[in-house]
C-alpha cells in the first residue's frame, strides 16, 4: 500500500515539476508548481511527519502558490508565451543536470545509505516539536518572526509605486529611468 | 521498498530538474519556480533523514527552511515587479543595467 502511494506521489511530484518549467503558458506552470508542492506534502505524510506536511500545505500551497499566480497574472505579457530558448543552451542544461544527477546518484548508491532502513516511528511528534521550538530554538523562533516581518515590509516598500511627484526628483539623464520617463510622457498624453 | 534511498532518489531527481530550469530558462518567474523546486527537494531530504535517524531536529529545520523560503519568494517577486516596471519584460537577459 505504501509502495503504491510512494510511486504515485513520485510520478505526480516529478511530472508536475517538469510541467511547471516546460508548460507553454506560465499560469499552468504556476498551478503545476502548486501540485508538485502538494506531492511533497504527501511524501511528508508518508514519512510520518504530519506537522511538517500541514505546514507545507499552509505555506506553500496556500500562500506561495497564490502569490506566484497573482504575480503571473499581473506581469502577463506576450513575451511570456514565446518559448525562444536556443537549442544549444537547452542541450547544455540537460547534459549538465543529467551528469550531476548521475554523479551524485552513483555516490549515493555506492554508499551505506543504499540499504539503510528507517528507525521505528516516533511518537508525539507535535509535542516534541513544540517543546524544542519554545526552549532550545526559541531565539531562532523570534529571529524567524523578525525576518518574516522584515521581508514583508521590504517587499511592500520595494513594490510600492512612486507617485509622480517623486519621479521628478529622479535624474532624467540616467538611462535607467528612460522607461519611467516614457511612461510619464504617455500618461501626460493620456491626461491631455 | 519505501526505504531511505528511494526518497533520496526522488529528491535528487527534483534537484536535477531545478538545476536544468535555472540553466535553461531566461524567464525570471520560471527561475523562481526552479529555485522553489530545489528548496522543496532540500526539505524532503531533511524530513527523510529525520525519519531515518528517529530524531526530531530535521523536521524543525525543515519548518524553519519552509518559512525562510516563503520570505524569499515574497522579496523575489517584489524585485520581479520592479524590474518589470522598469523594462516591461521579465526576461533576465533584457536586464542590461543590472550587469554593472
Image: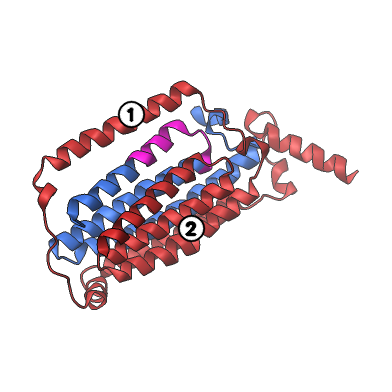
Q: Can you say whether A1 is above or below A135 in the image?
A: above
Name the one closer to the observer, A62 or A24: A24
Task: Name the residue at the left extreme.
Answer: A112
Is disc 2 on the same chain as disc 1?
Answer: yes
Q: Secondary structure at mark 2?
A: helix
Question: Which circle marks residue A64 in the picture?
Answer: 2
Chain letter tied to blue = B
What percent of the width, then of the height, locates residue A112? 8, 47
Magenta highlight range:
B16-29
- The quarter holding residue B84 reads top right
Ranked by sequence position, the earlier of labels 1 and 2 is 2
Choose between B1 and A118: the one closer to the eye.
B1
Q: Nearer the viewer, mark 1 or mark 2?
A: 1
Left or right placement of residue A142 versus residue B50 in this view: right
Let me know if residue B88 appears in the view. Answer: yes
Picture coordinates of residue A49, whole percent (x, y): 27, 68
Distance between the Cα atoms at labels 1 and 2?
29 Å
The hue used for chain A is red
Report the residue at 57% width, 32% height from top: A83
> Which residue is at the front of the view, B79 or B30?
B30
In reply to whether residue B23 is colored magenta, the answer given is yes
Classed neighbour count for the residue bearing mark 1: other residues with Cα under 10 Å, few (<14), some (14–19), many (≥20)? some
Q: Which mark is drawn over residue A96? A: 1
* Colouring used for the render: by chain
Q: Secondary structure at mark 1?
A: helix
Kindly indicate the quadrant of the structure image that contains residue B94.
top right
Placement of the C terminus of chain A among the 4 image quadrants: top right
Amino acid at each position: 500500500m505504501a509502495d503504491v502511494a510512494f510511486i504515485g506521489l513520485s510520478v505526480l511530484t516529478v511530472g508536475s515539476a517538469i510541467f511547471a518549467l516546460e508548460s507553454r503558458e506560465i499560469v499552468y506552470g504556476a498551478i503545476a508548481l502548486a501540485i508538485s508542492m502538494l506531492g511533497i506534502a504527501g511524501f511528508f505524510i508518508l514519512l510520518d511527519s504530519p506537522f511538517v506536511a500541514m505546514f507545507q500545505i499552509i505555506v506553500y500551497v496556500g500562500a506561495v502558490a497564490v502569490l506566484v499566480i497573482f504575480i503571473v497574472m499581473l506581469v502577463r505579457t506576450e513575451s511570456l508565451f514565446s518559448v525562444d530558448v536556443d537549442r544549444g543552451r537547452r542541450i547544455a542544461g540537460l547534459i549538465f543536470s543529467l551528469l550531476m544527477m548521475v554523479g551524485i546518484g552513483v555516490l549515493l548508491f555506492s554508499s551505506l545509505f543504499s540499504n539503510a532502513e528507517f528507525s521505528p516511528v516516533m511518537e508525539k511528534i507535535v509535542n516534541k516539536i513544540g517543546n524544542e521550538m519554545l526552549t532550545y530554538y526559541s531565539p531562532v523562533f523570534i529571529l524567524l518572526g523578525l525576518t518574516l516581518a522584515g521581508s514583508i515590509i521590504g517587499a511592500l516598500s520595494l513594490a510600492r509605486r512612486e507617485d509622480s511627484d517623486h519621479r521628478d526628483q529622479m535624474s532624467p539623464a540616467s538611462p535607467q529611468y528612460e522607461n519611467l520617463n516614457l511612461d510619464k510622457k504617455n500618461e501626460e498624453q493620456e491626461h491631455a | 521498498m519505501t526505504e531511505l534511498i528511494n526518497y533520496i532518489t526522488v529528491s535528487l531527481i527534483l534537484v536535477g530538474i531545478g538545476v536544468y530550469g535555472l540553466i535553461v530558462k531566461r524567464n525570471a518567474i520560471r527561475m523562481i519556480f526552479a529555485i522553489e523546486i530545489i528548496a522543496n527537494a532540500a526539505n524532503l531530504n531533511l524530513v527523510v533523514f529525520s525519519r531515518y535517524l528517529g530524531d526530531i531536529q530535521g523536521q524543525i529545520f525543515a519548518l524553519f527552511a519552509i518559512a525562510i523560503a516563503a520570505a524569499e519568494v515574497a522579496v523575489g517577486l517584489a524585485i520581479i515587479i520592479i524590474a518589470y516596471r522598469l523594462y516591461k519584460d521579465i526576461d533576465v537577459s533584457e536586464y542590461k543595467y543590472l550587469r554593472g
